[in-house]
Image (spheres, helix red, strand yellow):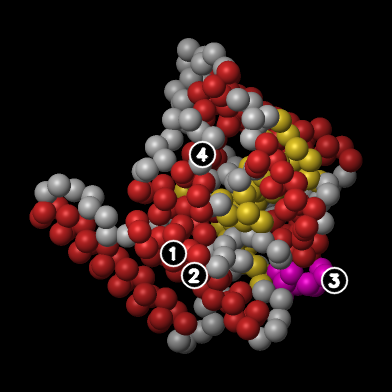
Amino acid sequence: MQGHYINLERSADRRAAMTLQLQQLGLAGIARMPAVDGQMLARPARCAISQSELGCFLSHALAIDAAARDAGEGDALRLVLEDDTRLSRDLPGVLRSMSPADFGDAHIVLLDCQPYMSIAALQALWASLRTYREDRAAGQPGRVGIYDAQALYYWGANAYLLTPRGQRELPALVAAELQAGPSLAFDMWLNRLVREQRIVASVLAPFLAAPHLENHANSTMADRDPLALPIALQTAARAIFFADDDIDALEAYVRPHLRQLRAGERTLQLLAEMVGEMAANDFVVAAVRAAQPEDGRAATSDHRNDSDGGHG
């Protein structure tokens, strides 16, 4: 597996951590891509995003261009990572088991994302996680499903695979957006392309990557509010569906953020808590019912992370 991880020159601690992680997983082909520091940029007149978001967009553009240049070496998948990404121990085995043909006409395959917080999206992700855990409890390799991003992908670009089609076609789309603005942060731009069916994207679940839990409080995005409650909970929501996550550590991280006062007006606060409880109840009921009649395996395709590349 070839590819890049994006890293700012000033983020030496992240660089060291990512280097060690890649070594431990045997992913020696993933090289560092120097990131563009948005704080050092002059913001273009037509740019509708912050300087930090612009730097992030340009960094991903460099990684995508590099993958496109490498495409001449063969018809292969290319991995792109941000430097604050945790990778599953099963990732190398899953990558060995997959080929571009597994993803049909997809341009991009996301190893994790911030999902839509809908019952349908969360139910699909929960079914994938439950299947994976059942496999592991039975001493079997965990199956990883391939899902259509249309129903799942809200935002996030911590970890993704570029298919041969993506390597051919995404550079021109990226260049056009940069010339026009850009109008959206990189991941929200991907969301728009998916919604408008200008690109085809898939999501692997359970997630084989996730941002570190402390990501929101130690972001290199200078204009991101480190105390913003939704960002903390969104990070945790992504981690819930990470294949390797430690539920004890995750619960310890989440608990202080739950039931924090969101509104000064008591009636509005009460309404918010009621809506949250009703949504939680609907999700739990749907998950329990889905588990009873069938095995809940709703993925379009499954892969086991065994060393011989066999498919589930």
- Identify residue type, mark 2: Asp
Residue bounds of the magenta highlight: 303-312
Query: Where is mark 1, residue-wise?
Result: 252
Magenta stretch encompasses residue 311:
yes
- Identify residue type, mark 1: Ala
Density class for disc 1 (Cα within 10 Å; few <14, some 14-19, many ≥20) is few
Query: 210 or 280, which is in the foreground?
Result: 210
Query: Where is mark 3, residue-wise?
Result: 308
Q: Picture quarter containing residue 148?
A: bottom right
Q: Closer to the observer: label 3 or label 2?
A: 2
> Which of the two discs, 4 and 2, labels the residue nearer the N terminus?
4
- Distance from disc 4 to disc 2, alpha carbons, whole Å, reads 24 Å
Answer above or below: position of 242 versus 261.
below
Magenta stretch encompasses residue 6:
no
**Which residue does the image show at 81% across and 32% down from the upper left?**
69
Query: Where is mark 2, residue-wise?
Result: 248
Label count reads: 4
